Amino acid sequence: MNFNEIKDLLTDKFGQGVISAIEPMGLQPALLINPELIVQVCEELRDNNKTWFDFLSCLSGVDHGPEKNKFEIVYHLASIPHKLQLVLKTIKEHDRNSETLPSFHTVSGVWRTAEWHEREAFDLLGIHFEGHPDLRRILLPDDWEGYPLRKDYLAAEEYKGIKIN
Amino acid sequence: MQVNKTRYAQLTEGLKPEEMLINMGPQHPSTHGVLRLELITDGEIVKEVIPHMGYLHRCFEKHCESLTYQQIIPFVDRMDYLASMNNDHAFVMGVERMMGIDKDIPKRVEYIRVLVCELNRISSHLIAIGIYGIDIGAFTPFLWCFRDREHIMNMLEWASGSRMLYNYIWVGGLFYDLPVGFEERCTEFIAYFKPKLSELNQLLTDNQIFIGRTAGIGVLPLDVAINYGCSGPMLRGSGLKWDLRRVDEYSVYPELEFDIPVGRGEMGKTGDCWDRYKIRTDEIAESIRIIEQCLERLQKELKRSPEFDPRAKLPKKIIPKEQDFYIRAENPKGELGYYFICDGKTEIPKRVKARAPSFNNLSVLPEISRGVLIADLVAILGSIDIVLGEVDR
């Protein structure tokens, strides 16, 4: 199956609203998926015998900076039986100065790989995953303040009396 | 924000009277670095394992946002510090594809890259096997593996100037051509090493004590392995023929002959610790085959010449077009991936995310070590072959 066939498969199943845009830039085109439908889309892509995307290679959180105020999750899927690769993206606008964190649905129920990758995105970018079974910091200490991979992050002066420079 | 209790809170609160919480690590020798495992035990039985990482977190991804592509390569070395060449190769391939220069790389450069990567793969697997022996209680394999690994490190030091963190493969070429006499010395090493490998097999592979400690322990079913994103020897140990060198056919691997060993459950069940160990020894033999083919070509049709300049194709400025790109390659530990986002204006990437094989391989540990003995947990952890530099990045 090629990229366009996968796109048609998804629009046939979920309607036109599922794919909000296509990013044809560069070597790997990506499908921009409606954030509300991402779990169903992933389940369909995993279980459909034409695609069988059974392997989640990578899940990355992206912060687009304070001007755009957008947060993005990028899913790199791989299909072992069909030797395919696919990129899915979901994007949400979020005011970074508000009290809440940007929130996406978790796909850890589809691929368990996502569990630790989502914890990493939560840890470093401050993205909340709804329905995640174990959303804690993974690389930084539990009492760390702030989310270092955000573009507007300022390094703390000190951590527990230890100077940071 | 969080309404529901995390799984961690559910597990660690309200232990039963017979249960005990034990910390294994961060300085425990069998954790191969600074990994802390929180164990909920009932006597000698491990009921639950909770890994805690981050002791070696060095902000790799944050650093990448302020460095040029060429400057990132030394940082990439320090991720899986036992297989720096392979890390470099994957990273450099990704940047070259984004630049569109991956087809212009001279053949000799590509063959040298594969040669040093496979040498590095052998040395990484030698560590995995040697340390695994020590985890199980066999001291001799450790010394023998390190003795042979020293030869590889000396050779790579000769080529790159550094013992472990090479920074040898550059975007568009190499740091230098191989030193004069490298091919001959490498041929000598292969002749020396082949009998040593069968000696090593006699020490561990057919050792009844070793088989007793590893066969049938930590069985990883294939569906669980795929669902958790395991790759490399972990996935192949569970019986799936999946090697990105063959699947993606990158670099000059399509021109080389080698087999992909898979686990068959010879001693116990498919996907047990012994299978994962055996995959590594078999892969060393396959890497030797690749090295022999590379050496033959490097000494014949791709012979060194005074005109050959490994830096001839180096781009003056590395500014890929605006795009994002995910590259994956087969590291000794599994699928190593880099996800780049470039803005098309600067030499500095907007974001680089590393998908480390050890990170994903480690995530399956709690799943396959429920209900095992504490001593077996050490055997399982050793068979995963993690490098904490890569888990924590």
Image: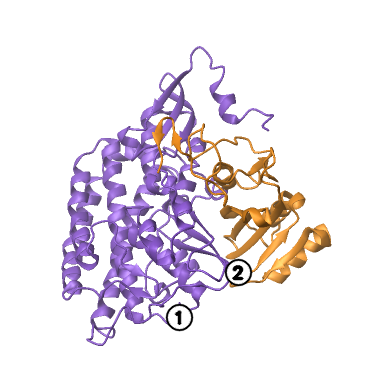
Chain colours: A orange, B purple
Q: Which residue carries the number 1 mark?
A: B103
Q: Is residue B161 at least partly visible in the picture?
A: yes
**Mark 2 chain:** A
Residue B47 lies, with reference to residue B80, above or below; the image says above
**Mark 1 chain:** B
Residue at x-position 76% and y-position 61%: A19
| Mark 2 Cα shell of 10 Å, populated few (<14), some (14-19), many (≥20) | some
Instruction: Tell me residue A29's x, y (percent).
Output: 64, 69
Residue B72 lies in quadrant: bottom left
For this orientation, the residue located farthest to the bottom is: B307
Q: Is residue A72 at least partly visible in the picture?
A: no
Residue B255 lies, with reference to residue A90, above or below; the image says below
Along the viewing direction, whichever of B352 and A130 lies nearer the viewer: B352
| Mark 1 Cα shell of 10 Å, populated few (<14), some (14-19), many (≥20) | few
Instruction: Tell me residue B109's x, y (percent).
Output: 33, 77
Residue at x-position 45% and y-position 27%: B39
Q: Which residue carries the number 2 mark?
A: A28
